[in-house]
């Protein structure tokens, strides 16, 4: 976090047994990466892990982000394989690196993207606004690479088929009127795992 921005903890989703459809909900891919909050205040950028550790030096390409106003973004840092699928194994190669020169070399060989799915602060706190308003604010930020805004859809069926066919980690459902509850696991966000996809750390 930066000296001029308040600190936040990520909001967490509640596990849900399977896909569903409801007009009051929106759906997006559950990315296979590392959760991060990114604080942007002029030239001062901080990448903070889910546990509140400073990971800025590990992802220097994300630290190049510059915006016209102080912003706090919530999303997932991902590494893509040759077929464009998120690969946690590739990301581990970046996570396990230490030292400026080794990380700098890895930026070229294992680049990462920051897939953004929420905004907590945009000129001022927006956590108390409904998801629909925060989403509108997020889409209006025109985030540059390596950021990408996660796409959302109204119905879960086609998205779940895509997740299943491409062996992705799962899907997240978010209630459209939900506020952002820092540090809380809320039933207003539901994560639906694709059990065909298994993550193993050796």
Image (cartoon, rainbow, N blue to C red):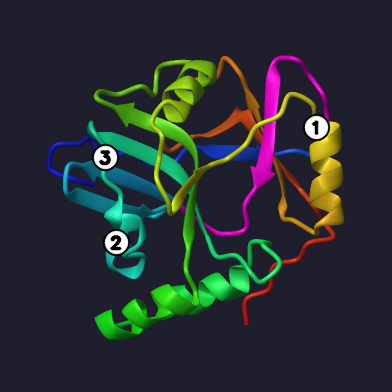
Task: Confirm whether the magenta stretch covers residue 153.
Answer: no
Task: Confirm whether the magenta stretch covers residue 29.
Answer: yes
Q: Is residue 15 left or right of residue 36?
A: right
Tell me the mark number nearer the camera, choosing from 3 and 1.
1
Residue 7, disc: 3
The residues bearing labels 3 and 2 have C-alpha atoms spaced at a distance of 15 Å
Which class describes the residues within 10 Å of circle 3: few (<14), some (14-19), or many (20+)?
some
Q: Earlier in the sequence, mark 3 or mark 2?
A: 3
Q: Earlier in the sequence, mark 3 or mark 1?
A: 3
Q: Secondary structure at mark 3?
A: loop
Q: Is residue 124 left or right of residue 91?
A: left
Q: Position of residue 157 (x, y in %)?
A: 86, 34
Q: Residue at 78% of width from left, 19% of height from top?
A: 22
Which class describes the residues within 10 Å of circle 2: few (<14), some (14-19), or many (20+)?
some
Q: Taking the image as drawn, is residue 13 in sight?
A: yes
The answer to which image quadrant residue 182 occupies is: top left
34 above or below 81?
A: above
Q: Taking the image as drawn, is residue 52 in sight?
A: no
Q: Secondary structure at mark 2?
A: helix
The residue where tag 2 is placed is 56
84 above or below 144?
A: below
Q: Which residues are magenta?
A: 19-35
The residue where tag 1 is placed is 156
Residue 16, disc: none
Q: Position of residue 13 (x, y in %)?
A: 60, 38
């Amino acid at each position: 976090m930066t000296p001029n921005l308040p600190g936040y903890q990520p909001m967490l989703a509640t596990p849900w047994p399977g896909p569903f459809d409801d007009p009051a909900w929106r759906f997006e891919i559950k990315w296979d990466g590392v959760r991060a909050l990114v604080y942007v205040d002029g030239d001062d950028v901080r990448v903070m892990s889910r546990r509140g550790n400073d990971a800025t030096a590990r992802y220097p390409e994300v630290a190049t982000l510059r915006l016209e106003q102080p912003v706090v973004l919530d999303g997932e840092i991902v590494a893509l394989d040759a077929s464009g699928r998120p690969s946690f194994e590739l990301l581990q190669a970046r996570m396990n690196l230490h030292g400026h020169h080794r990380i700098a070399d890895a930026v070229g060989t294992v680049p990462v993207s920051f897939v953004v799915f929420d905004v907590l602060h945009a000129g001022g706190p927006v956590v108390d606004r409904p998801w629909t308003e925060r989403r509108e604010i997020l889409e209006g930020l025109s985030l540059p690479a390596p950021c990408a805004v996660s796409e959302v859809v109204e119905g879960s069926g086609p998205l779940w088929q895509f997740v299943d066919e491409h062996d992705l980690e799962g899907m997240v459902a978010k209630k459209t009127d939900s506020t952002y509850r820092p540090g809380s696991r809320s039933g207003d966000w539901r994560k639906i795992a694709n059990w065909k996809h298994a993550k193993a750390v050796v």
